[in-house]
């Protein structure tokens, strides 16, 4: 059975269980919560080994063919472009559709969240290079280590051949193990979707966030089913852009219900290779970079959420200078959320409210009850962007082995 069918069946069962099982019993809810957490851990379990070995091999091959710099720059430019577009979509939609005000919260201001950019920058170069392999959340140190190793292999290919062969074998073995886990978590997605549905229905029952959820659903559909296929159609002359969306069904479902971009990255890697036919030397470099930096969905959710907070606090209009400030900061901060595989959008919202000041420092508390849901939409869009953008880069570099739909996993 195809993975996407398993995921569709699993999430449907999970939502139905959330509707009909008596979750007022604490033990039942605790059991499903445990199963959901176990599923997410299994999905991320072999991600680091795959990224490390795959990226090392990919960097070596790209450097040998003198395509490393071009591929890296093109990946970053593509990520920046799509992030800017999705940010503008979020701002325009939130300005056009005036959502009802959210009642002011009486909750006390909590300790502000900090991005700790200096600390994360230092973590790129730990005292022991092997230490880069032990952080399951922030993946950038792994990329740096793999990049240096790949460049080292390419600098002296004759002496490095035994080590390169070993890494190539470990890369393929790691991918085989990852493939096993992606098949296995199709069962666990029942618990993951069930817990998400419980949170969603509880939040929706208050009626406070209905308008916001509808707007985010509309923006998500427009971006994933409209913007991304259209861009792919015109930018790289792809005759069948929706085949990428078809390949992304399981990763997008995984991202939506888990809210975890690292969890969905494992699924994306599987479908990029086995469904879309993206060659390893592109998929192993571009996709992880897009996953960390091209967080266009997060930028969109940040912008929409901040406008909702601003309008809930003040009846004054939003000035053009505020729009420019919000566009720049939402766009910029989305590139600094690599250490937030989950909850990045809400963390960024707290920072925006703090930076904006003017009595809005506690504004993010208005959306705290809905944080898990809005971050889930952000993760779904981020995952779709990662898959579409990687396919775009691979197509431009002619690194795609095209497959028929019946061959998709």
Image (cartoon, rainbow, N blue to C red):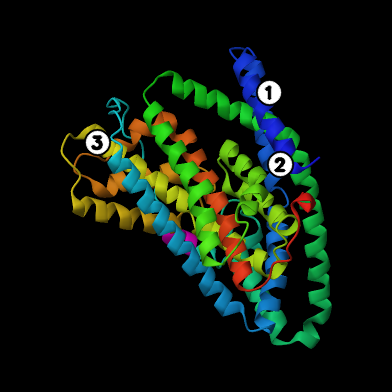
The image quarter containing residue 274 is: bottom right
Where does the N terminus fall, quadrant-wise?
A: top right
Which residue is located at x 65 percent, y 20 percent? 17
The residue that label 2 is drawn on is 4
Viewer-closest of 296 and 244: 244
Q: Is residue 285 on the magenta stretch?
A: no
Q: Is residue 324 above or below residue 113?
A: below
Query: Mark 2 and mark 1: span between their CA atoms?
Result: 25 Å
Mark 3 and mark 1 residues within 8 Å of each other at the beta carbon: no
Q: Residue 276: where, in percent of width, then height? A: 70, 58
Q: Which residues are magenta?
A: 117-121
The residue that label 3 is drawn on is 311
Q: Is residue 64 above or below residue 242?
A: below
Q: Residue 185: where, in percent of width, then height? A: 73, 39
Among the two numbered marks 3 and 1 on one chain, the one whose residue lies closer to the N terminus: 1
Among the two numbered marks 2 and 1 on one chain, the one whose residue lies closer to the N terminus: 2
Judge whether residue 362 can be spotted in this image: no
Crowding near the residue tagged with mark 3, few <14, some 14–19, many ≥20 C-alpha atoms within 10 Å:
some
The residue that label 1 is drawn on is 31
Q: Residue 303: where, in percent of width, then height? A: 35, 46
Among the two numbered marks 2 and 3 on one chain, the one whose residue lies closer to the N terminus: 2
Which residue is located at x 72 percent, y 34 percent? 188
- Left or right of 223 in this view: 57: right
Give the overall secondary structure of the magenta segment: helix
Query: Mark 2 and mark 3: span between their CA atoms?
Result: 40 Å
């Amino acid at each position: 059975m195809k993975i996407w069918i398993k995921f569709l069946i699993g999430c449907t069962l999970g939502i139905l269980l959330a509707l009909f099982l008596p979750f007022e019993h604490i033990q039942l809810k605790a059991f499903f919560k445990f199963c959901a957490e176990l599923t997410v851990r299994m999905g991320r379990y072999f991600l680091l080994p795959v990224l490390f070995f795959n990226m090392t091999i990919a960097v070596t091959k790209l450097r040998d063919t003198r395509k490393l710099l071009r591929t890296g720059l093109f990946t970053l430019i593509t990520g920046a472009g799509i992030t800017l577009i999705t940010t503008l979509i979020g701002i325009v939609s939130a300005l056009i559709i005036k959502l009802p005000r959210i009642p002011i919260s009486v909750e006390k201001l909590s300790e502000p969240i900090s991005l700790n950019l200096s600390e994360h920058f230092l973590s790129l170069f730990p005292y022991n290079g092997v230490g880069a392999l032990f952080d399951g959340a922030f993946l950038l140190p792994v990329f740096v280590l793999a990049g240096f190793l790949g460049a080292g292999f390419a600098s002296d290919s004759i002496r490095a051949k035994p080590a390169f062969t070993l890494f190539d074998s470990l890369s393929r073995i790691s991918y085989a193990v990852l493939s096993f886990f992606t098949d296995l978590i199709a069962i666990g997605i029942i618990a993951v979707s069930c817990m998400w549905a419980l949170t969603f229905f509880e939040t929706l029952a208050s009626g406070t966030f209905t308008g916001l959820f509808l707007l985010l659903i509309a923006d998500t559909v427009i971006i994933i089913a409209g913007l991304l296929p259209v861009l792919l159609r015109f930018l790289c002359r792809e005759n069948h852009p929706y085949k990428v969306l078809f390949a992304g069904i399981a990763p997008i479902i995984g991202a939506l219900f888990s809210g975890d971009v690292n969890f969905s990255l494992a699924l994306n890697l599987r479908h990029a290779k086995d469904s879309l036919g993206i060659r390893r030397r592109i998929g192993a470099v571009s996709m992880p970079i897009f996953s960390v930096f091209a967080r266009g969905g997060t930028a969109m959710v940040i912008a929409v959420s901040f406008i909702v907070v601003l309008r809930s606090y003040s009846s004054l209009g939003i000035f053009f200078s505020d729009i420019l400030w919000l566009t720049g900061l939402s766009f910029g901060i989305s590139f600094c959320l690599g250490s937030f595989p989950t909850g990045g959008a809400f963390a960024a919202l707290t920072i925006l409210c703090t930076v904006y000041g003017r009595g809005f420092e506690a504004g993010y508390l208005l959306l705290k009850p809905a944080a898990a849901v809005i971050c889930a939409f952000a993760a779904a869009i981020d995952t779709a962007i990662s898959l579409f953008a990687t396919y775009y880069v691979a197509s431009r570099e002619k690194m795609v082995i095209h497959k028929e739909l019946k061959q998709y996993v």
